[in-house]
Amino acid sequence: MKAKPGKIISQIVIWLVVLLFALSCLLPLLNMVAISLSGSDAVAANKVGLWPVDFTVTTYNKLLGDSQFWHSFWISVKRVVIGTLINMFFTISMAYPLSKSKKRFRAREIYMKIVIFAMLFNGGVIPLFMVVSKLHLNNTIWSLVLPGAVPVFNVILLINFFKGVPESLDEAARIDGAGPLTVLLKVYLPISLPALATVGLFAIVNHWNDYFSGLIYMSKASMYPLQTYIQQLTVDLTQITDADQLKQLSALNNRSFNAAKIVVSTIPLLIIYPFLQKYFVTGMVIGAVKE
């Protein structure tokens, strides 16, 4: 049976819209890559489009050749791993009981009001800095992960997902003698992979992209995470005394250097995303009992 002309046209329009959105995300990134690989004169003259002009890798040699870059990179990796594990633990632990009805958790409404208030208002940077300082957490990895240990927005997302899990699954597990912890680990978490992948990706991106925390909590440049390090890094030709090095660095400017920063800081997230993407398109409850 032939497809109707109207349906074909609607499909073409949908694909064109999707293509435009994809290009709007991809083309700026390609431009950044081209700028980071182009010579200083071409960048200054705005001659760089989607392909490098006067190809050079001096920006990456400068950025990746610094030992502090790799030290900061390792700090960011540790922050992402530790911070994401802490975020996921508290998010799941908080969302599961709050997803239950008021009949099963009588204090639910009180805690939900606290959660909503915490999402809308915060104590501010100065009180938070004072607390971190009083606890002697400055210049440690814990100052980067503990202040944001409970991401309230992620908690609300997971609460709404847990509410969508069929109640009959919970009842069946409890009839078989499973306790609340067993129900959470054996029933809710296995069928919650799409939601867990989503909040996990949010946590990873938040920890990886945050540079401000390192700026206010770290007084030593050697303790900077990667994003703080590359935000503070600039090309200063006046400090270069070696003639060969000066000749190499003259082939770049701060615009191409900033483009290289963006590219380098984006690559780890581009590597992680494909591994989590499959969970975003997976059914919310596969093979579960439907109400």
Image (cartoon, rainbow, N blue to C red):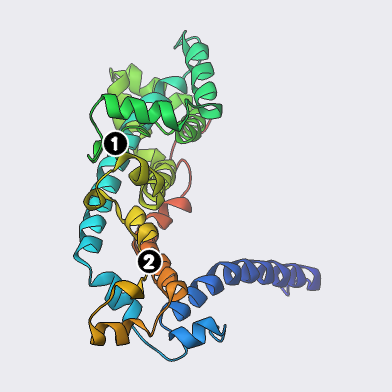
Residue at 54%, 71% (x, y): give it. Answer: 28
- Viewer-nearest residue: 6 or 287: 6
**Residue 161 location (% of width, % of height):** 49, 34
Residue lying furthest bottom in this view? 54
Residue where numbered disc 2 is placed: 234
**Front-most of 247 and 180?**
247
**Residue at 37%, 58% in the rendered image:** 232
Three-letter code for the amino acid on which mark 2 is drawn: Thr
Residue 61 location in percent, x, y?
Answer: 27, 77
Q: Residues within 10 Å of mark 1 (few under 14, many from 20)?
A: many
Query: Which numbered disc, 2 or 1, marks the residue closer to the eye?
Result: 2
Residues under labels 2 and 1: Cα distance?
A: 26 Å
Q: Secondary structure at mark 2?
A: loop
Residue 258's spot in the image, x, y percent? 43, 68
For residue 143, the mark is: 1
Helix, strand or loop at label 1? It is helix
Q: Quadrant of residue 183?
A: top left
What amino acid does circle 1 point to?
Ser
In this image, 71 relative to 209: left or right?
left
Q: Which residue is at a point 39% across and 58% down the rendered structure image?
A: 231
| Left or right: residue 273 compared with residue 32 | left
